[in-house]
Image (tube, rainbow, N blue to C red):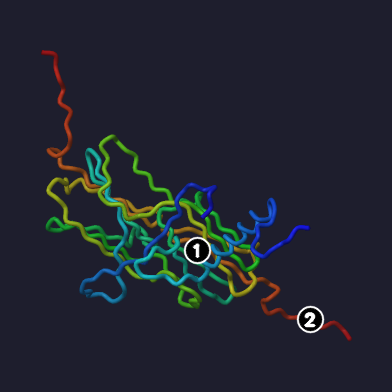
Amino acid sequence: MATIRFGSPLPGESWGALDRLQRDMTRAFDRLGTIRDLGRGSPFPPVNLYETAQGYVLTAEIPGVKSGDLDVSVEGERVTIRGERRIDYPSDGSTSLHRRERQTGVFRRTFNLPELADPEKAEAVCRHGILMVRIPKAESIQPRRISVRAC
Amino acid sequence: MSNQNPTREIETREKQEVEREQTRPGIVFRPDVDIVERADEFLVTADLPGVDEPHVDVRLENGLLTIRGELGVEPEPEWQPLYGEYRLGSYYREFALSDRIDVNGIKASMKDGVLELHLPKAERHRPRNIEVRAG
């Protein structure tokens, strides 16, 4: 008879799946509402979130990111920004880099809105290095007038 | 970290405030820059997120190149901030230029919140190929 102990790996696929879930959870917690320590690296891009009468506006500083390298998705109350920032300096054979402060690489950030959003009506624009995502609140939670039919 | 994706994930530092006496109100940040030297020029690239072309000012005075940027995109006053990771302000950075630069040939352009400055080397500082003739 097999004894199952706590902490022993489950056979086959499930261990990988659990491990992946664990990692995803850690990642999610790392990125949601992180307190930014001075001098320490913070996730890119930095994001601000605002509430308006109709919904939410999320802005992010993404200078130099092409819209083709950017992917924004809204699902329920969850907003995800993914993309890549590429910086290429074509070499002419005698190119040398004196200073490199601008970072490159891939990024992925997820935010939970306080309320359910309407993904169908979400809009994203990128202007002058600022991404702006407007997400209306879901109609189901917006105040609604209910007409009263004859009793 | 995921193993499937070999590309490095970006991190960013909190925007650095410029430490100098200001005559204008508001916070001033020091933009991140890259400086590349090529055979015939220096290329300075600066991140100025939110700054559009009419709001950037590049000036050269007494061998000092200054970059100033003001925000062209700002949140509307009725938006209520819920959560914040970056602060808003203007940008300032200065560089001492060597006499190797042809100051009349400096060109600047602004795209997607990134300033590109092309500083051509003065003719006498460019590398030259010396033709070798048969003896």
Quadrant of the frame with the N terminus of chain A: bottom right
Query: Label 2 vs label 1: CA separation?
Result: 36 Å
Q: Position of residue A134 (x, y in %)?
A: 55, 66
Residue on which the image places disc 2: A147
Q: Give, as a three-letter code, the residue at label 2.
A: Ser
What is the tally of numbered marks visible in this picture? 2
Q: Give, as a three-letter code, the residue at label 1.
A: Met
Residue depicted at 38% across the width and 57% down the height: B113
Residue B128 figure quarter: top left
Q: Position of residue A49 (x, y in %)?
A: 50, 71
Q: Is A38 left, or right, of A35 in this rendering?
A: left
Helix, strand or loop at mark 1: strand
Q: Nearer the viewer, residue B18 or A96?
A: A96
Q: Chain of mark 1?
A: A
Helix, strand or loop at mark 2: loop
How many C-alpha atoms fall within 10 Å of the one at disc 1: few (<14), some, or many (≥20)? many
Residue depicted at 16% across the width and 46% down the height: B101
The vertical placement of A129 against B118, above or below, is: below
Q: Give the label on residue A132, or none.
A: 1
**Outermost right residue:** A151
Residue depicted at 89% across the width and 86% down the height: A151
- Front: mark 2 or 1: 1
How many C-alpha atoms fall within 10 Å of the one at disc 2: few (<14), some, or many (≥20)? few
Residue B126 figure quarter: top left
